[in-house]
Image (cartoon, helix red, strand yellow):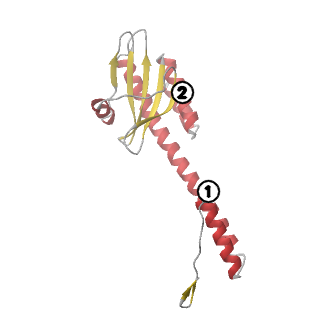
Amino acid sequence: VLLDLARALASTHEPPALYAAIHGHVVRVLPATAFTIALVEAGGRLRPVFHAGPGDGALALSAEDLEHLRAGDFVLRAAGAGGLALAPLLHEMRLLGCLAAERREGRAFDASDANFLLAVGQLAGVAIENARLFAEVRRRSEEAERLELIARDLGASLELADVVERVAGRAYEIVRKPVVLWLVDGPRIR
């Protein structure tokens, strides 16, 4: 299952497809009532980015749970007839988020289940970070292409009024806010 998952994760850089692949492979081994992938936001809070099953995927984790995840450890919680298994998503020992599998009935998760989820988390952490980097490269490439088009457009005329109009128009396209250009004309600004 881990080998199949590694192949699936290597073949896509789109987060929704990554999340679905992770979920599909995990539930082959760990049947769960609910499954969540949550990523760490800027403020340190975990935000669900994928959820299957009942509920909304919101995770109420204690500071101790988060410390275990940051240390690369799994967390097991028994709850009645079932339980919760959490595994960190790490990249170079930085916590990206976590995987959470929940069972509402049946046997509780044990250490072997949690170790499997931990292995999935190690593979998934690398894939999720690669997808983030891929998206960043794509965004920067699109930005560079847009800037190149703007430079070509601005260089197409030497008439001051035309250049000013083009600069203001292109700036508005980028910021989507009103744009004012001030020109220095000797001792005056207009």
- Placement of the C terminus among the 4 image quadrants: bottom right
Q: Tag on residue 92?
A: none
Q: How many marks?
A: 2
Q: Closest to the observer: 174 or 97?
A: 174
In what element is the residue under mark 1?
Answer: helix
The kind of residue on which mark 2 rests is Asp
Q: Is residue 189 left or right of residue 117?
A: right
The picture quadrant where one finds residue 82 is top left
Q: Is residue 158 left or right of residue 19?
A: right
**Dot 1 crowding, Cα within 10 Å, few <14, some 14–19, many 20+:** few
**Residue plotted at (59% across, 75% down):** 181
Q: Where 33 sits versus 171, above or below? A: above
**Dot 2 crowding, Cα within 10 Å, few <14, some 14–19, many 20+:** few
**Residue plotted at (40% across, 28% down):** 59
**Residue plotted at (71% across, 82% down):** 159
**Residue plotted at (59% across, 57% down):** 141
Q: Where 81 sits versus 92, above or below? A: above
Question: Which badge, 2 or 1, is on the more N-terminal residue?
Answer: 2
| Residue that carries the numbered disc 1 in the rendered image | 142
